[in-house]
Image: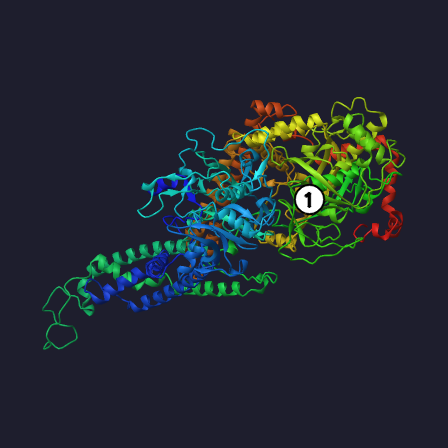
Amino acid sequence: MTTNEAEERDRVIVAGRPDLDLCRNQIITSRYTLLSFLPVGIFEQFRRVANLYFLLIGVVMFIGENTPLFQSVVNPVTVLFPLCFVISVSLLQEGLADLGRHRSDSKVNNHPCIIFGRSKDVDNDKVRKRDDTVMGGRDVNIDVYDQNSRANGIAFESIKRMNIRQGHLVLIRNRDMVPADLVLLASSADNGNVYIETSSIDGETNLKLRSSPNLPKEITKKMFDEDGNERKVIRETLEEATKRICKLSALAFPHGRSSIENANNRKGNESRTYVPKNSSPQSVFQMMKNAAKSISTGLGEITKYQDASHYAEGEESGSNYVMAVKSEPPNASVNTFNGVLFLPPVDIDGPSVEVPLSGENFLLRGAVLRNTEWAIGLSCYTGKDTKLARNSFETPSKLSRLDELTNQTVFSILGIMFLLIAYLATATNLTNNYYFEHLWYAGMSRNPAKQWPYLPKSFEPPIWQERTQNWFQLFFTTLTAVSQFVPVTLYVTVEIVTFVMRFLMNSDLNMYDTETDTRSIARSTTVTDPGQVEYIFSDKTGTLTQNVMTFTRCSVDGKIFGAPVMESSPASTSINSTFLTLDNLLEYNSDAAILSFNREMFLRVMSLCHTVVVEKDFDQKTPHKTIEKEENKDIENGVATKEEKGRDGAPIGFAYQAESPDEGALVEAASAEFDFQLLSRDSSGIRLCVGSSSIFSDEVVVERLKNGSLTEERLAADTASSEGKLGFGATPSMGVHEELWEVLAVNKFDSTRKRMSVLVRSPPELGSIPMLLCKGADSAMLDPSVVKDPSHIIIGGDADGQNIGNGGNIGADIAEDEFDKDSNLSLQSHLGEFAREGLRTLVLGVRILSESECADWLEEYQEAATSIKNRDELLSKAAISIETKLHIVGATAIEDKLQVGVPNTIDLLGKAGIKLWVLTGDKRETAKEIGYATKVLTEKMRNGLIEVAQASTDEVRTIMALAFLKLVKHAKLPDYQSAAISSETAKPMETFFFKFGKFRRRMKRAGRRFWHRYIKVLIWYCMCKSDLPDPDPVLMSIDEEERKEESILQVTERRRNVRNRAEKIVRDYLNTTEGMARCKSRLYFSSDDKIEVEDVELPSNGPDVFDKAQSARSLLKKRHPEEKKASREIEGLTKEQLEASCGSARDADDELV
């Protein structure tokens, strides 16, 4: 079987049985070994043309020095010795650089890791050793079977990372790097979840959630404890997890057969996994626990197959089935994983239990375990088979750009040199043959008896050389004479400069990070390249910004809460909106001592609509502050208490873990700022500690919401007004209290919907009301198909604000409709202000459901969740079906501060001629503000800034071409105007005059040359003048004039082609059906077939946030003209007046004014 065929087959990994035929977990990034260093290194050195040249020249000199073939003018030592010195220095630098790679590889490969092993095997092998740091070095006692007897004990074995094999069960601890690609089986967290940091893989610093595989309850209902009751486990200890997993592995049954080999397994195209309808997922570690229990208790006995031929003589004739994984072949896709986990059969003669595996159950090598005490995984891919290694490549053997330039220069010098040598060899050969008889002084003569001139005739004739050297001999002789055309000292200088530059980079204090104690290390010898960088491609979040989100402002009930952020864009117009401090969001608006409906639901969406979980803070990296309450309680059994808060709002000793920093910022703000503290999240729901009374404590309100006689809009309007009265019943004061909200379903965020939602049920004391909480981008939330009343949503960008949605809330009273309209218009106006400040915005909405609506949708959701095919599609459709008729309660604004020194750094990069491209997922308005703040965009770019919305390729190309032509039209690019690039093909007459002028200038220069070179000299001689002036300066100026004209003509030709292509792009697009439909006005051509760009305008795909905000403000001013004066008066308030108006110093901080 070939290697490619083996890679195409699915991998079968048996838990606890390492596969020694597959690759080790060793990673090699070095380029050389001890044996290959000299041959490969020397070969690499001779990739430099000069080194190869000097080697050949040295060989030629050696041959000429030691053979009669030709004569060498220079001793070969003068060339070969410097060459050896240069190569030795280069090899030394390469060796030192590769030695650093070897040390790094050795550190990584020899790092100690922990695997599970049988105690007996570990103790009997002198090479293997235990890890005494886990459980004090003691064993985990389980029933372990061997050939002849039964022994107890699973040991935690310490092993080098490179010795991990596929099939090993691996233990990872907090802050440890995942040593190989693992399938997650258990962890210390709820339901076997873990958090990993993948900054070393994809650069993202936010933690990612991974979970153990899930099973439907119908599969696990036959697995009971000894008392016959189904057991529900949320957390388990390391000892419990070890027992559970090892009982199902080959560590307990070393001769066990893989569960994949079960003859009763489904075959063919049948579904692998039994997934019935209307089932909610349950963590597989609970099912595995009960299955392992059933092995020893006999409840659900695992079938044993009597197949003596399967084993060698003397071994057990029967075998238990053990856990195994069937996975896809090794590949480079880091975001996906497909496999099946096979567990031993539960029923006699039954099939193995098959659990589907995905990327959510997969831990990549290189990720770091965070905020999880421990995790257990099955090694799936190791070494070069890991996904990270598949995405890597061998250390390239490349030359620096300086070396490439040097090679090109040497090629040019060699070409000139060989032409010169050929000329000299030819001239020497001809001269020698012509004057041969006169070369007696060189010992040449065709007459052997000829006497040496000037000597007595009594002397014997010398031994004359009867013929001269031929052309080839003269060529090599001359080659040795002019070999120094390429100076060997050039490469000596380059090597010394490279060595010094590496030393300076390694010792540069400006490139040292004190926080992480990390210095720059030049691991490559191509250190001259960083100074020649032309383009930098960067993302925004986490690179230009700190990726530390801070809840800054919000819009609720038509009011802004939170101080504005300083704008960075040039010539930005201030909106002058009034605002309140964040603390004012908790002010009561009525005598009932409750928050308004919008404010309460706004805070509940922040604290409930997320996937954040509360975990023990094993890192303990930040100090905390204590908020004293009536009584203090300790943290018990991993459950957070409500009396204390950490700096991020989480209970003391705990931390909020979010998949995105935006979610974390909202949850932290809800807890720290508004006393809606998230305490825990588990299968029972989300537990909150709330410091405000709830409107749902009014039984009359709850009843009317359930029967539909009270709408969200009516409740919001009545509770938002200080004069409004509920009139529905008494609302008791609840004080600080705990609430348990049941989570019925979670619709995760996706790029199509651009929002997420959770279906929850309020606690019994708050009426047990099913409701949908939703948050998302403003474009996705303020959509006529999503909101309950689209008549209050701006869908156009006209200045008068007349283009709004159709429809309306039929049956609503005037006050309710007016408040809802004002609130939505104000929110859209505030979104524009937030975007202008560069803040990240989210819109929040709710929907109260009836019991029948909730039940019907849950049935649809369960069918989609348990579907094998097109599960993501079906879940998305289910989410879209319920995310309608939303009542908008507010919007949040989150600030992601820039990294220290980013604007100055980008400014310096620009001055150095480096172009910077930044990729961001923000909307255009926010992206522009961030661009100005980081100095990626400057004041000079403001007028020429081009915004291209989502469109087809042809349309985007046309927009860019139109923008270029408009700049030419308005004289912003004068070099591309018609007067500067007069085309030769525009008109016959213009072409004639252009060619005539070119011919005239050429003839004029020829006449001037003839005058200065011949006529002027002749006249000077005829006048018998001896002081003849040198004509060379004049002739050189004429040549320079000619070269300048040619370069101008070349640049002009290029600019002419650019403009012609831009015009052709526009013309071709506007002649298409799409172009005719998109063009606002009819296209006109001038008499010379040139496009009049002012007559061409392509409409945008929709108004931006600023246009909608301006329309909303226009409508609000028409509806409430008296507020215009108030907005102007706030500009004149001093800080003291503002503090007095806020009521306390706490309400107005220093940043507010």
Whole-percent x and y of residue 857? 65, 27
Q: In terms of image quadrants, where is residue 759? A: top right
Q: Quadrant of the N terminus?
A: top left
When the figure is inspected, residue 985 is found, relative to residue 144, above or below; the finding is: above
When the figure is inspected, residue 1070 is found, relative to residue 136, above or below; the finding is: above
When the figure is inspected, residue 83 is found, relative to residue 1118, above or below; the finding is: below
Residue toward you, 594 or 205: 594
Q: Amino acid at mark 1?
A: Glu
Whole-percent x and y of residue 488? 37, 64
Whole-percent x and y of residue 1087? 59, 25
Q: In terms of image quadrants, where is residue 193? A: top right
When the figure is inspected, residue 1053 is found, relative to residue 29, above or below; the finding is: above
Residue at 73% x, 36% y is 762
Whole-percent x and y of residue 835? 71, 41
Q: In terms of image quadrants, where is residue 431? A: bottom left
Can residue 821 be seen at all in this image of the molecule? Answer: no
Q: Which residue is mark 1?
A: 929
Can residue 925 be seen at all in this image of the molecule? Answer: yes
Instruction: Classify residue 1037 as left or right of residue 1101.
Output: left
Helix, strand or loop at label 1? It is helix
- What is the crowding at mark 1: few (fewer than 14 residues within 10 Å), some, or many (at least 20)? many
Count of labels shown? 1
Instruction: Classify residue 658 as left or right of residue 308.
Output: right
